[in-house]
Image: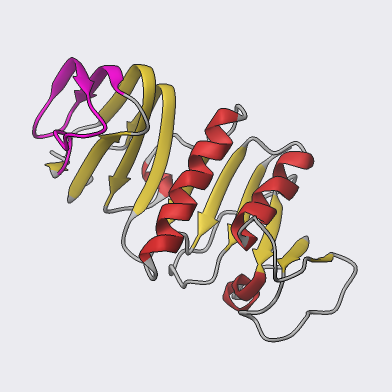
Amino acid sequence: MGVCYIFASLACGWTPPVGPGDLVVAADAGYLRLNGVKPDLVVGDFDSLGFVPEGEGVVRHPARKDDTDTLLAVRLGLARGCRTFAILGGLGGRLDHTLANIQTLAYLSARGARGCLVGAEETALMLDGGSIRFAAGLSGAISVFAYGAPARGVTEEGLEYPLDRATLSPDYPLGVSNAFSGSPARISVEEGRLLIVWNGRPEDTDFFL
């Protein structure tokens, strides 16, 4: 299965490169953010949208539930075999929803999948071991945080402030406010999870490869 693109409620100004085999899911009010992209599924309780869309791909849930609409969309993607997720409109707006979406990235990571959140100006992804590469020519800020537990063996190459197999703690923000240098960059972690936030888009990286 390809990439699962989930449209959440906030506008992010990014049109995903949907290709054959990809899955597009609108989560509740994300139905209003499709901008011409055809969804395969529309899911939620539709309290934010204010009406229930018509069509065979509509999956309605009661308003009193444990899962957020975004997590419901993630569950659908996992059930259909997706292992790479991009949640559009997943950053910004209400802080509690942003935190819930970050936890959703951890939910994906715990199930052997990976995800990113795309906001109006920033993208966030969770790296659970391994590495992520960034293209040359980038500028702006990039921050790295240990998530949930210490992250060990953290290496940052090609950025203004490099790290070499450092340990980051979830209660000390050592990795905040680094910057791209214009060179190709790479961030890796040997053990633990990293939340990486930068001023850019998923296509700045090898995330979809």
Residue 195 visible at all: yes
Residue 6 location (% of width, % of height): 61, 57
Q: Going by the picture, which residue comes out furthest to the left?
A: 161
For the point 38% across and 21% down, which residue is it?
Answer: 192
Residue 8 location (% of width, % of height): 56, 65
Side of 7 where 182 appears, left or right: left
Residue 85 within the segment the image draws in magenta: no
**Residue in front for this viewpoint, 18 or 71:** 71
Residue 169 within the segment the image draws in magenta: yes
* Above or below: residue 111 compared with residue 201: above
State the image quarter where residue 94 is shown.
Answer: bottom left
Side of 98 where 185 appears, left or right: left
Side of 110 where 188 appears, left or right: left
For the point 56% across and 29% down, which residue is it?
Answer: 110
* Above or below: residue 57 compared with residue 18: below
Find the magenta span and give its range. Answer: 150-176
Residue 20 location (% of width, % of height): 73, 47
Position of the N terminus by quadrant: top right
Report the number of numbered marks: 0
